[in-house]
Each structure stands twice: as C-alpha cells, then as structure tokens.
Amino acid sequence: MATLLEHTTDVAVRVTGQTLTGVFASGLEAMNQILAPQCCLSPKQADCCMDVALKAPDPTALLVDFLSECLALTYIHKTLFCFVHFDQLEPTRLQARLYGHRFGCLENEIKAVTFHTADLRQNREGVWETPLLFDL
C-alpha cells in the first residue's frame, strides 16, 4: 500500500508491505502511478519482460536502486513495468523479472528516485515501510 504525502517540489510517498516483496512491489506501483496514473490498473498481456539483478549494502539502498533501475528501463524501452516477480529478494540482493506495457507518453516525468528521507525498516507491527521522494 502507498499513501501520498505532501511535499513542496517533488512527489513524496510512504510505501508499506507485510514483506520485502510487498514493499518493493508497492514502491513500483507508486512510481507507476506518478508516471502514468491508471495505466497499470487493468490487467493486460505484457508487451515486454526484463530481468534485473542487483546488490546493495542495505534494504533502503536496494529499494532505491531497484526503483531507479525500473525507471531507467521504463525510459529506455518506452515501457511501464507494472508487474514484478522476484526469484530472489533478500535485504541486500534481488533477482527479478519485470513485465511491462508499452506507452505513448507519460503524464509525469521522474528524474530520479532519491535517498532523501528513505529509510526502509520494519515497524513495531513487523510491517516494512519507508518514505520515498521522487524528483520530478
């Protein structure tokens, strides 16, 4: 689940998930909602699939790197990656397959997924959560 937070110049969201898989999928969903609201809401056949493998020093860096990689692939392939399947997801490494739909144009452009305020942790209830800031 992702909740829109107010921010003066960029778009800030809080992403949450019961598992690491859930919070990573929530981050991807939030980013896609910024890029092209409604585009990923109705199920469609994927036009493109891409494999990604990443390592990072901690879960926060892994999430930001994952979303940054998805963003780069979105612009390179003109494809919004709406679905992800994780073959491996640990706090410092992941292997995943992204499934996407080609698009004509995006409603918003994201320049970067930033580390500003990002701090992926489990809360007292065991839910993974972090604020994320997208630089528009």
Image (cartoon, grey):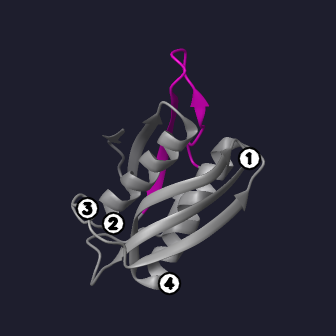
Residue 55 position by quadrant:
bottom right
| SS label for mark 1 | loop
Q: Residue at x 36, y 46 (%)?
A: 7
User: Is the residue under label 1 in contact with that under label 2 (CB below 8 Å)?
Assistant: no
**What amino acid is at disc 3?**
Pro
| SS label for mark 4 | helix
Looking at the rendering, the stretch of residues picked out in magenta corresponds to 116-135
Vertical comparison of 8 with 77: above or below: above
**What amino acid is at disc 4?**
Ile
Q: Which mark is residue 43?
A: 3
Report the side of 28 relative to 35 (left or right).
Answer: right
For mark 4, what is the residue? 76
Report the side of 4 relative to 66 (left or right).
Answer: left
For mark 2, what is the residue? 35
Q: Position of residue 49 (x, y in %)?
A: 48, 74
For mark 1, what is the residue? 92
